Image (cartoon, rainbow, N blue to C red):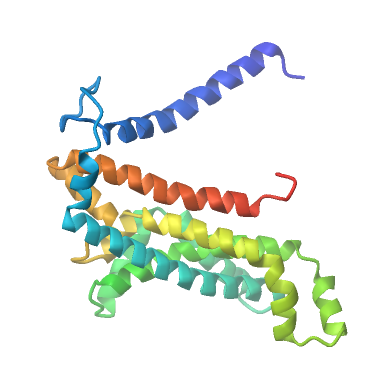
Amino acid sequence: MESRATRILLGVWVALVLAFLFVPILLIALYAFNASNVQSWPIRGLSLQWFPATWANGEVRAALWLSIRAGLIATALAVILGTAAAFAVHRYRFPGRDALSFAVVLPIALPGIITGMALNSFFVFWGMQLSFWTIVIGHATFCIVIVYNNVLARLRRVPRSLTEASMDLGAGPWMTFRRVTFPAISTALIAGALLAFALSFDEVIVTTFTAGAQNTLPLWIFGAIRLGQELPEVNVIVLAVLALTAVPVWLAYRVTMDPDGR
């Protein structure tokens, strides 16, 4: 049984870890409202002046729209391919089944720079010009993992007796999927899609190797930080990115919760 001192130490440790993770994020969010273009502490005042200035930047709007388009298409591909892979691994036994499962999961385990370099080498080998579609392909490679894991975990929780009962009552494979299987895995699909979009939207390393002349929002942020001339706008964009990625993650968490809140 844990002593009171142990619980206090664990609580302090958790608080320190959370502060290490989230205090820098809160500072960036606060700097987005800084009245000055100099990032110093304490800030000189609060202002909303950088928000319209950032939106007026054509490069920012183009990069934002490109990131959203790439994320949505990559998510759609991930949902289709990840779901198909999950059904294949769950329902069938075939040579190379474990190898397929490992290959699908591998991209999320590799560092982003390795995945990006591998994709870049693949595109160069086949003479593919870096473009919007190479960004989509690059993002889909690791987004598939999110959908695959969510759907496979849900399929393993769905009793096979439900499918068998549907078949016994005369339903064909398509009706069984539409009336039984799909409702059972729908929340896993939604959660996987939301998480995949959030992961795609803020991915910068893979995008760096697959974008070519395309400038997505993470790449614009990276360039602006490197040059150091648009830091107030960077803070606003970072705040927007945090919101756009946090909302899908929160929604995915809510979707996958049990009705009793667990």
Residue at image location 70% in from the left, 69% down from the top: 183
Q: Is residue 165 left or right of residue 41?
A: right
User: Would residue 92 be seen by someone viewing this image from the given angle?
Assistant: no
Position of the N terminus, as image quadrant, is: top right
Tell whether 170 sits left or right of 81: right
**Image coords of residue 221 (percent x, y):** 24, 48
Q: Residue at x 27, y 77 (%)?
A: 125
Residue 130 higher or lower than 21, as above or below: below
Q: In this orientation, does residue 78 appear?
A: yes
Which quadrant of the structure image shows residue 211? Answer: bottom left
Residue at (29% x, 53% y) in the render = 218
183 left or right, relative to 107 = right
Question: Looking at the rendering, which quadrant does residue 94 occupy?
Answer: bottom right
Horizontal and vertical percent for residue 22? 42, 32
Q: Is residue 47 above or below residue 13?
A: below
Instruction: Looking at the picture, tell me which residue is in the foreground, 216 or 33.
Output: 33
